Amino acid sequence: MSEYLDHLKARPNRATTPELQFVAPGVWALRNVFVNLFFVRQGYNTGPWVLIDAGLPGAAGKIRRTAEQLFGPDARPEAIILTHGHFDHAGALESLANYWNVPVYAHPLEMPYITGRSSYPPPDPTAGGGAMAWLSGLYPKHPYDVSRRAQPLPDDGSVPVLTDWRWVFTPGHSPGHVSFFRESDRVLIAGDAFVTTQQESALAVWEQRQEVHGPPRYFTCDWESARRSVERLARLQPAVAATGHGIPMRGAVLQRELTELAQHFRELAVPAAGRYVDAPAVADESGVRAVPPPAHDARLPWILGGLAATIGLGIGIWLSQRDEGRKSYKRYRRHRQHHLDDPAAYSVDPFTPVDETDGWFPGPQNL
Ligand SMILES: [Zn+2]
Ligand SMILES: [Zn+2]
């Protein structure tokens, strides 16, 4: 067990990875507090680009500045495309779409939540897993409204602007959740269909310790669909997966853990108890139709006590880790070049152009 923990500790985490990361040619991930969003360019070094997901409320300025760093002054995407519309993925959507004056694409089943027509099914604090779950009752769940700009993704699976990509229907975490896949080098942007950190736990979210997990439990409203979605993604055998939460993963470690998640989804991902465990929320193209009643939770007083303790502990650990974090970041910067020889390389300088003629990542035979 402790060997396993040491192994996990050696993996990239918040202290050892920059906020803006190179994921694959033409793909960058930006970490916004605890959620990721993606800049994806059609060509490796030139060409139009889109923003996939739009971060937390208030992130618009940061996202715009990052776009300018990557693509030059006044950089503007051709579109904003959503994996889904939860508040941490569409928080800055209205402000960015208006500023850039661009269309917003999402799956038809996700439309009600970005066109002001329906709130999401209520989050489930009883799904457990840690403070992020317990607090989920407080998360915004009102719909965003970009009706004037919202358009459904084409139903042939193609992705607007990004001709090398296709969207994959991966519902369960939300009714119209989609992922994005680039077949040529098997790059996957999975949104919250699965994630690479234990999103329910505030401590894990702070550290961003890297490991494959099921979709964040407190928002997942249909567990059977979520299981099938993970199976679908595992069958794609992604070489790289960038998810809505956590640090991108790649290679053999990713494939092993994703396969394991698909095979043992019930044990690994589905909570023991919770509002949507026995019955899903029912939703259609006009929004939520029916939700199961809240799970009775005799643990609530304990949960509130635990929550206070967790926050205290989290602050304590954070304070004590701050210096250590800075030190490991410096170490990481020093060793970054060596890092590139490592099949588990997680980050190269996001601003370095990529040689399109060069294999940028080992093919399946080398994984
Ligand atoms: Zn979500
Ligand atoms: Zn999320």
Image (cartoon, rainbow, N blue to C red):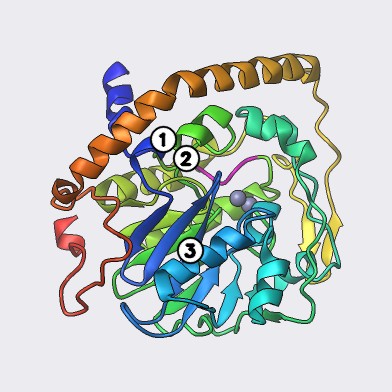
Pick the residue in front: 264 or 130. Answer: 130
Residue at image coords 55%, 83%: 78
Amino acid type at image mark 1: Arg
Residue 66 — which label?
A: 3
Circles 1 and 2, Cβ within 8 Å, touching? The answer is: yes
Q: Is residue 4 visible?
A: yes
Looking at marks 1 and 2 on the same chain, the residue that comes earlier in the sequence is marked by 2
Looking at marks 1 and 3 on the same chain, the residue that comes earlier in the sequence is marked by 3
Q: Position of residue 134 (x, y in %)?
A: 71, 30
Pick the residue in front: 53 or 108. Answer: 53
According to the picture, the residue beneath numbered tag 2 turns out to be 197
Specify the quadrant of the image occupied by residue 116.
bottom right
According to the picture, the residue beneath numbered tag 1 turns out to be 209
Q: Separation of disc 1 and disc 3 at Cα?
A: 24 Å
User: Can you name the residue that lies furthest to the front here?
Assistant: 73
| Location of the C terminus (image quadrant) | bottom left
User: Does 203 appear in magenta?
Assistant: no
Q: Position of residue 174 (x, y in %)?
A: 67, 56
Q: Position of residue 61 (x, y in %)?
A: 61, 61
